[in-house]
Image: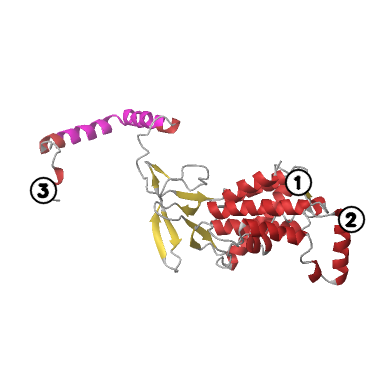
Amino acid sequence: MPNDAHKGLEKSPPQDAKSEGGSLAASVRGDPDNFRRTLQEATAGERQGSSDALKHFDVAGGPEIVDDGAGAKNIELAQVIGTERTNPTDRAGQSDQPGDKVYKDGKLVRERSATGNDTVIAYDKEGAPHRFEDKPIDKLPVDFSGIPEWRREQLTKQAGDLIKAYNEGDPPGTGDGKVSFTDLSKMMKDVAARQDLTEIEKARLWSDVRIGLQKNDVTIDDSDEKPEMIDSWKGSDDPWHAIITLDDGYHGNRLINMNEKDARQAIQDHENGAEADKMPFPRNLIWRGAKAVLGVNTGDINASEGTLRALRAYRSGGTFQHYADAWTKEFVK
């Protein structure tokens, strides 16, 4: 050890250290019961949460093996938050400090970045970890091509679980058998709060929810939807101008990439039958008859414009939370 390693520290004479150490050892051996009681008293406060005397020991935790995205494995110690070890449990809703590590079900799922985008860690069928950069959404439609197939399967299953939970009631299991617009808003906010998903994965999860709702004929209760947004022709049977996938070719691609004035005109033209002539003859005839009787579908016009406002907030803000908040404001009473 370098000679200056102890600068600023007072050195006890060797004989004092020897005599003190010998005296301490002798006292411990001489009265072990007293030593045991001393330890019990010293740790009692720690057990009761009133002392931090021992919390500085073993703060690093065990190693985490993560995938660097190129197949290589890295060993990382659990991140120390302040002076306390991050426990391997969910940290959603807790501090979001740069360098924080977020766990779910005992697995590392997010590493917060101090300078760039967070990293999300996902686990495949074999439990192997994979790392994904959590980029904000800055263009529409959302491009899902970079999501691996095994991850897509996980998201589809999670969408089914989410639909089931709310279809059986809110709170889950109350058995109302339908999904209201308030339920849809809560589902969106559940997705937005997920720490184990990237923003692109949140968009894919919500899109799978949208697909599952229609595919499984889930009853949509529009009693809490703003009345002006309800389809003027079919009512609750056609809520799909309000509830869309985020790679939708009409709202999420064609219209959102027009300026607001052109998009508004395109919606008007669409509802006035601009595409009716492209329909097969029987369907064209039925559509024109319905329009003659029911008039312009103002509910669809309003819903499409509300959806575009929510999508603009989404693209501007970059997170699914922005979309969820804007959508709720547009559609829920």
Which of disc 2 and disc 3 is earlier in sequence? Answer: 3
Lower sequence index among marks 1 and 2: 1
Which-is-in-front pick, marks 3 and 1? 1
> Which quadrant of the rendered structure holds the C terminus?
top right
CA–CA distance in space, label 3 to label 2: 99 Å
Q: Is residue 7 above or below residue 30?
A: below
x, y (%) of residue 128?
Answer: 51, 63
Q: What residue is disc 2 on? A: 293
The image quadrant that residue 143 belongs to is bottom right
Q: Which residues are magenta?
A: 19-45
Q: Residue at x 77, y 46 (%)?
A: 222
Q: Earlier in the sequence, mark 3 or mark 1?
A: 3
Q: Residue at position x 72%, y 46% from top? A: 181
Q: Which residue is mark 3?
A: 3
Residue 140 bears which disc, if any? Answer: none
* Closer to viewer: mark 1 or mark 2: 2
User: Callout 2: 10 Å neighbours few (<14), some, many (20+)?
Assistant: few
Q: What count of labels does the image hold?
A: 3
Q: Secondary structure at mark 2?
A: helix
The residue carrying mark 1 is: 228
**Residue type, label 1:** Glu
Q: CA distance from mark 3 to mark 1?
A: 82 Å
Up-down: is 11 above or below 290? above
Q: Is residue 41 magenta?
A: yes
**Along the line of sight, which residue is nearer the eye, 110 or 105?**
110
> Decide: marks 3, 1 in contact (CB < 8 A)?
no
At 56% from the left and 67% from the top, the residue drawn is 148
Indicate the amino acid at tag 2. Answer: Val
Find the distance from the CA under tag 1 to the CA under tag 2.
19 Å
Q: Indicate the secondary structure of the residue bearing disc 1.
A: helix
